[in-house]
Image (cartoon, rainbow, N blue to C red):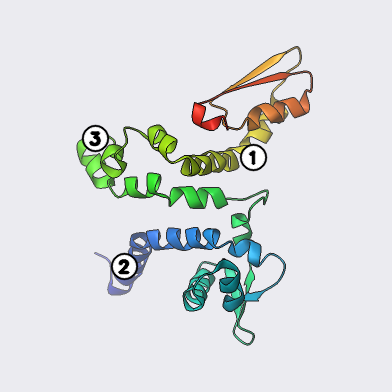
Amino acid sequence: MSGPDEGAAYQQEMLGLITGFWVSQIVRTAAALSLAEHLAEQPRTAKEIAAAEGSDVSATFRLLRACTAFKLVTYESATGRFAATALLDTLRRYSPHSMRNLALVQTAPAHWRSWGHFTDSVRAGSTQFQAALGNEDIWAYFEQHPEEGRLFGAAMTDLSTPVIREAADVIDTTGVELVADIGGAIGTFAYELLARNPKLRGLVFDRPLVLP
C-alpha cells in the first residue's frame, strides 16, 4: 500500500494521462492557428494573433496561456506578449524538424474518432474503423476526404525523412540503374537516392490518391 503522499503523486500522474487528449487538441489548435509562424519573428499579443487569424481574442489568449504550461510559448505579463520557444518551432511549416502535419492529422477525424472506439476494438479483437467513420478502411476514407489524406501523407514524410536521409547515406547504388520506391508517397526516398547518384532513374509506386 502506498502512503497518502505517494498516492496523491500517482493521482496527479494519472490525471495527466486521463487529460492527455486535452493537450493533443491544444497542440492541434496551436498548429491550426499558425502560432509558430506568427511568433517566428517577434513576440506578439493575443489580440494581434487573433486579428491575423480571425479568432476570438479572449479564447486566443486562453489558448496561448495554456500553451505556456506545455512550454510552447513564454508570456511576459508586463507587455502582454507571447514569445515562441524551440518546441513551438516544431509546429512551423517548412521547419526541418516540423511536426505540424502530424499534429493536424492525428487529431483529425480518421484517427481521432477511431481512437474513441478503442475499447470496442480490444473487446472484439478487430478494427472498429467502419463503426467510427463508416468506411471499410482508412484508405477508402482518405479517398473521400483527400485533404485529410494529403495531411496524412505529409505527416508520414515528416516522420520518415530523417531516417530516409540516414539510410540514403549508407545505401550503395553503384552499378544500379533503377530504384523503385513501393508505397513511396511523394518519393522522398527516391529523391534522396537520386541526389546522391544522379545516374539513377526513380520509380515511385503508390495509390491513385497520392498521384496529384
Nearest the camera: 173 or 93? 93
Whole-percent x and y of residue 117?
A: 27, 46
Q: Does 163 sit left or right of 15 as displayed?
A: right
180 in relation to 89, above or below: above
Badge 3 crowding class, 10 Å Cα cut-off, few under 14, some 14 to 19, many 20 or more, is: few
The residue that mark 3 highlights is 125
In the shown orientation, is residue 123 left or right of residue 171?
Answer: left
User: Relative to 29, does residue 105 appear above or below in the rendering?
Assistant: above
Give the percent coordinates (x, y) of residue 15.
Answer: 34, 66
**Disc 1 versus disc 2: distance between alpha carbons?**
37 Å
Disc 2 target residue: 11
Which disc number belongs to residue 162?
1
Quadrant of the drawing holding the N terminus: bottom left
Determine the secondary structure under disc 3: loop
Instruction: Name which residue lies at 70% across and 30% down.
Output: 192
Where in the figure is residue 203, as x and y percent of width and height? Answer: 64, 20
> Amino acid under label 1?
Pro
- Viewer-nearest residue: 185 or 148: 148
Whole-percent x, y for residue 154 in the image? 56, 41
Residue located at (51% from left, 70% from top): 55
Type of residue at label 3?
Gly
Please tell me which of labels 3 and 2 falls first in the chain: 2
Task: Tell me, yes or no, whether the two marked residues, 3 and 1, touch with CB atoms within 8 Å.
Answer: no
What type is the residue that disc 2 sits on? Gln
Identified at 58% across, 33% down, the residue is 212
Quadrant of the rendered image containing residue 20: bottom left
Label 3 vs label 1: CA separation? 34 Å
